[in-house]
Amino acid sequence: MTEFRADVGYSAISQVEAYWEGLRGARLMPKRSEIDPRGIESALEHTFVLERIAPGMARIRIAGSHLSDLMGMEVRGMPLTSLITPPCRRQINDLLEDVCQRPAVCEMRLNAEISVTKPQLDGRLLLMPLKSDLGDVSRILGCLVAQGDIGHTPRRFDVVGAKIRTITAPSTLPIAQKQPAKTPDAPAQAQGFAEPARAFKSHAPRPDVPYLRVVKSDD
């Protein structure tokens, strides 16, 4: 997905994705309750959390100031599609389902509508799934970065490109260790749970030292 953010100015997208990856570790995804704003402090204005309320529909639960600036109003409680032009909303609905149901990470390339009062404005939108406290995949951690002059609000975007990456949990199995080569003078290496074989040593008593003594007692 790196080619989507090759332009300078989309570091917030990379920061939020790296934070999400760090939280999930060897799991498919982290929990919503694990998200700590201090971990993405420098990208907070671009970050938001969605709640999936129906197939293909998600509303904004928490949003950074950048989203409100783009819309010219408070966006909490609004559907994510309010930031998207009507012709592209069906595509957003399908991508939201991919994120929650596969599950997957999705990154989109956006262009805003242009008019006399609305100058060129390009953006990137990142969506990553989260588990709710009940264990279902009904939350999404997102990041939206728009580059350019906002101009007259509200600004809505066309989706001009999308990349979807299905999530697979990393293997937690240990990597097999390569066995060292055997040498004529070295005992064979143990396999599995067995311990290395030990050379047998005789413990026969020395001939010049009495091994047993007869003790006579008249008592």
Image (spheres, rainbow, N blue to C red):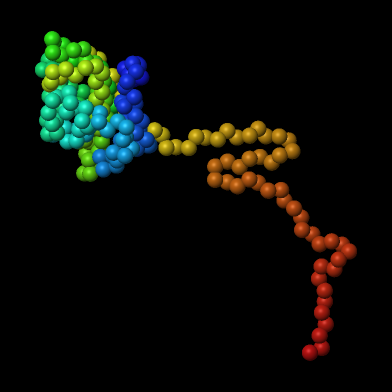
Left or right? Give the position of 89 relative to 180: left
Residue at image location 75% in from the left, 53% down from the top: 201
Left or right? Give the position of 118 relative to 175: left
Image quarter (top left, top right, bottom left or bottom right) of the C terminus: bottom right
| Identity of the residue furthest to the top in this view | 116
Percent position (x, y) of residue 28? 32, 34
Residue at image location 71% in from the left, 39% down from the top: 186
Q: Image quarter for residue 126?
A: top left
Q: In this rendering, does residue 145 appear at all? A: yes
Of 127 and 47, nearer the camera is: 47
Q: How many discs appear?
A: 0
Q: In this rendering, does residue 168 appear at all? A: no
Percent position (x, y) of residue 54? 12, 32
Left or right? Give the position of 205 relative to 122: right
Left or right? Give the position of 183 relative to 213: left
Image quarter (top left, top right, bottom left or bottom right) of the N terminus: top left
Q: Image quarter for residue 86?
A: top left
Residue at image location 54% in from the left, 45% down from the top: 193
Of 20 and 70, nearer the camera is: 70
Of 27 and 160, nearer the camera is: 160
Residue at image location 71% in from the left, 34% down from the top: 183
Percent position (x, y) of residue 26? 38, 37
| Identity of the residue furthest to the bottom in this view | 219
In the rendered view, tell whether residue 195 sits above or below residue 40: below
Percent position (x, y) of residue 160? 22, 13
